[in-house]
Image (tube, helix red, strand yellow):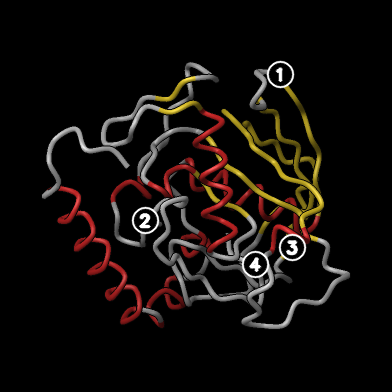
Amino acid sequence: MVKQGTVSDSASSPRIYPLRLYGDPVLRRKAKPLLHTDRLTVPGFSPQTVRQVADTMLETMFEARGVGLAAPQVGLPVRLFVAVEYDDDEEENEGSDTPLKSRVLREYVMLNPVLRVIDKKKDRSYQEGCLSIPGIYEEGVARARAVQVSYTDLDGVARVIEADDYLARVFQHETDHLDGVLFLDRLPAEVTEDYRRELLALQQKAKAYLNTLAARPPGEGR
């Protein structure tokens, strides 16, 4: 999920993952549970610890000026997402180069999260965006006001957290990604139609990137 009022920019860097864009099939697949919370081996990716993957996902999210990032958004079809809370008392100038990491209040790394709604009242007041659908922001996405998330942390400890308002929205947005659901799916069809040209362009970029991956030598990791 993208931070309100910021622009997604996944500039090339050795410490970040390329973001998968709208139209990439991995964004529509239901992610599989992580069977091990230490080592992660996925075809097309160099074997890494889950902690290394999470750290790189956080760096990718910060680089793109986001508030959350799910594993499928970097091509990993596993049930893992990262998210952060920022100190919004410190106003950020739009387009600022100030590292968002300096304003982080808390980081979340959630393995195999299970989300439960604890306040069914819907909230549509926030603008929502997505790092995999850059440049498109919409209000009106109905999200539960409060949720509870059960998950495993990087130390293998089972945890439970409750969240409301904007953080609850972030957790719901990222959990949707793990089920192959995008925020545009939760808006009327005519809204998506308004962005038909932009979405087609993203689909073309996604296809071009997949063609690049297919041309890589077998076994080359990311």
Which callout, 4 or 3, points at the residue further toward the start of the chain? 4
Which callout, 3 or 2, points at the residue further toward the start of the chain? 2
Identify the element where label 2 is drawn: loop
Identify the mark at residue 20; answer none if there is no mark. 2
Identify the mark at residue 3; answer none if there is no mark. 4
Identify the element where label 4 is drawn: loop
Identify the mark at residue 157; answer none if there is no mark. 1
**Mark 4 and mark 1: Cα distance apart in space:** 29 Å
Mark 4: few, some, or many residues within 10 Å (few <14, many ≥20)? many
| Displayed quadrant of residue 42 | top left
Q: Do residues under tags 1 and 2 come within 8 Å of each other at their CB atoms?
A: no
**Mark 3 and mark 1: Cα distance apart in space:** 31 Å
Q: Residue at x 39, y 80 (%)?
A: 195
Q: Residue at x 31, y 82 (%)?
A: 197
Q: Amino acid at mark 4?
A: Lys
Q: Amino acid at mark 1?
A: Val
Which of 111 and 212 lies nearest the eye of the viewer?
212
Residue that label 3 marks: 123
**Mark 3 and mark 2: Cα distance apart in space:** 28 Å
Mark 1: few, some, or many residues within 10 Å (few <14, many ≥20)? few
Which of 185 and 171 lies nearest the eye of the viewer?
171
Q: Residue furthest right?
A: 89
Q: Amino acid at mark 3?
A: Asp
Residue 197 lies, with reference to residue 142, above or below; the image says below
3 or 2: mark nearer the eye: 2
Which callout, 3 or 1, points at the residue further toward the start of the chain? 3
| Displayed quadrant of residue 165 | bottom right
In the rendered image, residue 45, in percent from the top left (x then y), is placed at: 32, 35
Which callout, 4 or 2, points at the residue further toward the start of the chain? 4
In the rendered image, residue 91, in percent from the top left (x then y), is placed at: 81, 77
